[in-house]
Image (cartoon, helix red, strand yellow):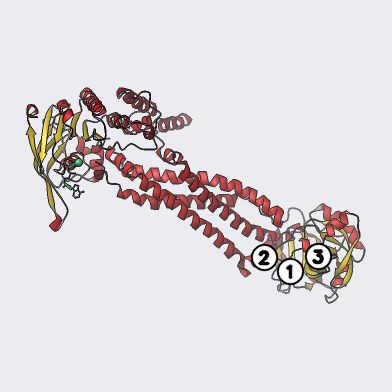
Amino acid sequence: MRSPTAIDKPTGGAAIAVRDLSHWYGRGDARRQVLQDVELSIDPGEVVLLTGPSGCGKTTLLTLVGALRQVQAGSVQLFGSELLGAGRRERQQLRRRIGMIFQGHNLLRCLTAEQNVQMGADLLADLGYRARRDQAREWLRAVGLGDHLGKLPHDLSGGQKQRVAIARALAARPELLLADEPTAALDSRSGREVVDLLRRLAREQGCAVLMVTHDPRILDVADRLLRMEDGRLFDQDPEAR
Amino acid sequence: MVSRGLQTIAGIWRSRRIPLAWLLLTRQPMRLAVALAGIAFAGILMFMQLGFRDGLFEASVTVHKLFDADVVLLSPRTTSSIGMASFPRRRLVQTLADPDVIGISPVNWNLLLWRNPEARTTRSILTLGFEPDDPIFLDPSISSQARLLQNRGWVLFDERSRPEFGPVAAWLKQGRTVETEVSGERIRVAGLVSLGPSFGADGNMITSRETYQRLMPSSPPGSIELGLIRLRPGADPDAAVARLKRLLPGDVRVVTKAGFEELEKTYWRTSTAIGFIFTLGAGMGFVVGCVIVYQILYSDVSDHLPEYATLMAMGYRLPSLLGVVAREGLLLAVLGYLPAYVAGQGLYALVRSGTRLPVVMDPQRALLVFTMILVMCLGSAGLAMRRLGDADPAEIF
Ligand SMILES: Nc1ncnc2c1ncn2[C@@H]1O[C@H](COP(=O)(O)OP(=O)(O)OP(=O)(O)O)[C@@H](O)[C@H]1O
Ligand SMILES: [Mg+2]
């Protein structure tokens, strides 16, 4: 189920390659630049953390890379496909290859943990219903929720919900994981657990990870650390933190 | 062929997904209950209004249906059962010239004043006069009592007449002799028949033409209001009507029995607002249902907007999410129709016993109401879908 433009082209094999990306919000006098000439490249299997003060444009970068927003200027190559000028349908097709984890868990309230994860697995059109359900169960076991398959989000703790969200994102077998402050709603211990889990599972899948976080305690999981300030992206020496 | 079909079904079954629409509805039982109550209410309202409408039209021909006839003669001035004009009886005799005609029966038909034997008040009663030897009724229980009518002044009373005519049936069953006045003449109730009230008449009675003449002295002896014609078995009534029309002059009208019934229904349909009123009532039910279902689905979509946006962010296509809302509408239609159908059956039974109107659940109306509910739910779902356009996956991070 890939659109014609989504065919992998040899762009050095990077999952994401961003060049000269700029973004503006608003029109006319209210027009304000939030991203300036951002350059970024993430390889498959690489875990990249992004930090920066509030309002500097991290989430905006994530939505652009996640094909959720139209690219205005510059170039974003996702698995070799150019997002600048890509249509709605093209972006929707590309999103199937991206797993997203949100600050809030954003689970479907009326579905059980297992069914929520299967909503991710259901995107894999080539698998039968049972296979997809088994995958959903397996992913829940992998995130340590094998005993909570039939529970509604309502009956799960914050950390458990976030783990369900991770299982859901991974069940669609993404090539790229985008996470925006996945630990914000969690206490430090379950935050740590969730991030470790995320990294381990992403490594196993060869899946690239771009994670926004404010949490200084989890920075050590990163292969590479980026810092954003006023819409500009800087490399940050991991040792310098 | 069969195996390919099975394969297709197995394929569809294999590729099925989480039944999101069903889960959205059933995991919010309060909202579902309100929606179903609304739909069922609208359905019941439509069933009742359309049932009454059809029942009233059907009731207008209860008497018409009793006659054993293939073709009937009427006066061209006749408008309906409450406006029966007379024509010369010899026109009926003339039809015997047609080879297909094997029997004829003259019938007098008018509304006369009946005096309630208990309360002494008067009320219009539909009176049929016929020759007691003529087999004019399909119902054998009437024919078997017909010889009683050879006694002058004796009548058969419709026990399903409205109670305003007096406790005639009860008295008769107690063995009392029931005598009263019709048009100022003394009559005696010799027996009971079961016909049922219609639009134009709250009650019916049957008597001989001879007694009828006494009750209606102003009507000339050679004139009748209805001529019944029986055809040879297998004869085509329409062809006979065409031949009789050529045979007879223009002072009579020839129609089939079905045409006779249609004439009556058409009269009530066109000359009264009944059809309009009840159709309007059903329309109201439809509109109320639309509003309720739209409200429910709209607030359901609104409540779940972030979740829909999340699904879009995951890569679900907008059409497949619109499909979820459409399926919610479809499920509501089916789930709401069932209680409406059952309640409709029950209420029809209640109406039948309460008003003696022939209101039944006929498949055509059942289908019509289902179609209306389907349009209601899918239309509302279609409108509620517009809300999904507001789900922006870029806003959920
Ligand atoms: N839809 C929008 N329309 C207009 N301005 C916006 C919109 N979204 C974000 N902004 C503005 O753009 C700037 C960058 O926002 P963004 O959400 O990317 O910041 P952030 O780095 O994610 O901040 P935080 O750490 O608080 O989440 C902010 O000043 C914000 O007010
Ligand atoms: Mg943010």
- Determine if the C-beta at disc 3 is less than 8 A from ligand 1: no
Mark 1 lies on residue? B74
Q: Categorize mark 2 by other alpha carbons within 10 Å: few (<14), some (14-19), many (20+).
A: some
Q: Position of residue B21 (x, y in %)?
A: 42, 40
Quadrant assignment, res A27: bottom left
Residue A231 vs B169, above or below: the answer is above
| Quarter of the C terminus of chain B within the rendering | top left
**Callout 2, which amino acid?**
Leu
Residue B328 vs A158, above or below: the answer is below
Q: Tag 1, which secondary structure? A: strand
**Callout 1, which amino acid?**
Leu
Q: Which chain is indicated by disc 2?
A: B
Q: Residue at x 17, y 53 (%)?
A: A26
Q: Position of residue B190 (x, y in %)?
A: 89, 59
Q: Position of residue A56 (x, y in %)?
A: 13, 43
Contact check, label 2 and label 1, Cβ < 8 Å:
yes
Mark 2 lies on residue? B263
Specify which label sits upstream in the sequence, 3 or 1: 1
Most foreground residue, B207 or B99: B207
Q: Total marks drawn?
A: 3
Contact check, label 3 and label 1, Cβ < 8 Å:
no
Quadrant assignment, res A20: top left
Left or right: residue A21 compared with residue B279? left
Q: Which chain is indicated by disc 3?
A: B
Does residue B352 show up? yes
Most foreground residue, B157 or A199: A199
Mark 3 lies on residue? B128
Q: Tag 2, which secondary structure? A: helix
- Determine if the C-beta at disc 1 is less than 8 A from ligand 1: no
Specify which label sits upstream in the sequence, 2 or 3: 3
